[in-house]
């Protein structure tokens, strides 16, 4: 069997294997805890094998099967990915020991809870794709398989959960409980937090936040780039500036794009 390392892959014939199947890269990620690194090393072989089979299966035919094999449908291994992601994310918190009811334990329990909520969000967004089989497009048989959602879909869902996150505290029995008893107890699908977020509007060198002063904004926009939101109510400065941009671009055979440099005046808004 071909090696699953970078050296042994035919990246032109199987580019998906180059991206997904290079299992040694997992253990080389900087900042891993000892438990996470061991998990990478233990699972790299099985994960690499799985990616090869999955990549060939989705494309239509595993090379090692007989010519009479018919495509039976396979997709992303959702259950395996869910288990691995949870184990990989949680192991950093579970390999430590904390005093019951301490702030460090509260953070660890919060991370474990949110890791699970994030993984469940991915599962809830999986889609079913189908392919027809039959002579001349008759679709006499249909095979369906699961596909993971796009990162944008997951990000949008997690942003909604973030906006509705519940503040919790840790009890002496090492359980997370809602701080405000008038609120309902968060479910396994909800995100939780133990401390208020810092004020990102103002510069905070300790947290690495540069604040929003001097940031370019869009006047009148209702989105996150709008001056009203981005400038945190401090107002903004308006000035006319001269900018140089590429213009009148054309393709030159072969093979480059040539452009002219054009200058124009524009109105720029920056946060105070």
Image: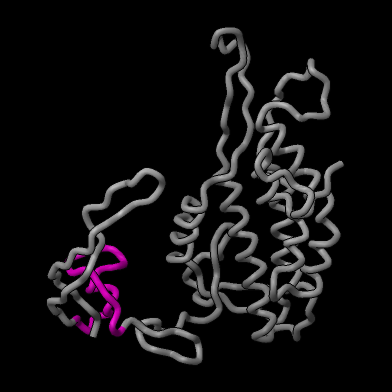
Q: Is residue 102 above or below residue 151?
A: below
266 left or right of 77 in image:
left
Residue 156 quadrant: bottom left
Quadrant of the image for the N terminus? top right
Q: Nearer the viewer, residue 197 or 64?
A: 64
Does residue 234 show up magenta in the picture? yes
Q: Nearer the viewer, residue 161 or 101?
A: 161
Does residue 6 show up magenta in the picture? no
Q: Residue drawn at (28%, 83%), measured in percent from left and top?
A: 214
Residue 13 quadrant: top right
81 left or right of 252 in image:
right
Q: Residue drawn at (62%, 36%), measured in percent from left and top?
A: 146
Q: Residue 221's spot in the image, x, y percent? A: 22, 64
Q: Residue drawn at (71%, 82%), measured in percent from left and top?
A: 172
Quadrant of the image for the C terminus? bottom left
197 left or right of 119 in image:
left
261 left or right of 91 in image:
left
Q: Nearer the viewer, residue 205 or 12?
A: 12
Considering the whole magenta stretch, tell me its main secondary structure: loop
Residue range highlighted in magenta:
213-236
Q: Residue 244's spot in the image, x, y percent? A: 22, 69
- For the rendered model, the colour scheme is one colour
Residue 148 quadrant: top right
Q: Residue drawn at (29%, 68%), measured in percent from left and top?
A: 225
Q: Residue 48's spot in the image, x, y percent? A: 78, 48
Q: Residue 85's spot in the image, x, y percent? A: 69, 58
Q: Nearer the viewer, residue 227 or 61?
A: 61
């Amino acid at each position: 069997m071909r090696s699953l390392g970078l050296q042994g892959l035919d990246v032109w014939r199987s580019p998906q294997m180059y991206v997904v199947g290079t299992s040694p890269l997992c253990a080389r990620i900087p900042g891993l805890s000892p438990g996470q690194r061991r998990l990478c090393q233990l699972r790299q072989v099985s994960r690499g094998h799985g990616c090869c089979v999955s990549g060939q299966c989705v494309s239509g035919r595993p090379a090692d099967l007989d010519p009479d094999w018919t495509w039976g449908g396979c997709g992303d291994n959702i259950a395996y990915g869910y288990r691995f992601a949870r184990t990989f994310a949680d192991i950093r918190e579970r390999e430590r020991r904390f005093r019951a009811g301490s702030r460090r334990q509260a953070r660890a329990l919060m991370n474990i809870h949110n890791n699970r909520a994030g993984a469940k969000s991915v599962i809830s967004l999986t889609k079913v794709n189908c392919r027809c089989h039959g002579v001349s497009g008759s679709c006499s048989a249909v095979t369906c398989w699961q596909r993971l959602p796009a990162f944008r879909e997951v990000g949008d869902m997690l942003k909604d959960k973030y906006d509705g996150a519940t503040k919790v505290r840790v009890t002496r029995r090492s359980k997370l409980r809602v701080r405000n008893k008038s609120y309902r107890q968060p479910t396994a699908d909800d995100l939780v937090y133990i401390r208020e977020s810092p004020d990102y509007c103002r510069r905070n060198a300790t947290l690495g936040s540069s604040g929003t002063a001097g940031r370019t904004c869009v006047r009148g926009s209702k989105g996150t780039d709008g001056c009203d939101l981005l400038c945190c109510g401090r107002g903004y400065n308006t000035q006319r500036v001269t900018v140089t941009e590429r213009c009148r671009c054309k393709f030159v055979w072969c093979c480059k794009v040539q452009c002219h440099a054009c200058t124009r005046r524009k109105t720029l808004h920056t946060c105070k």
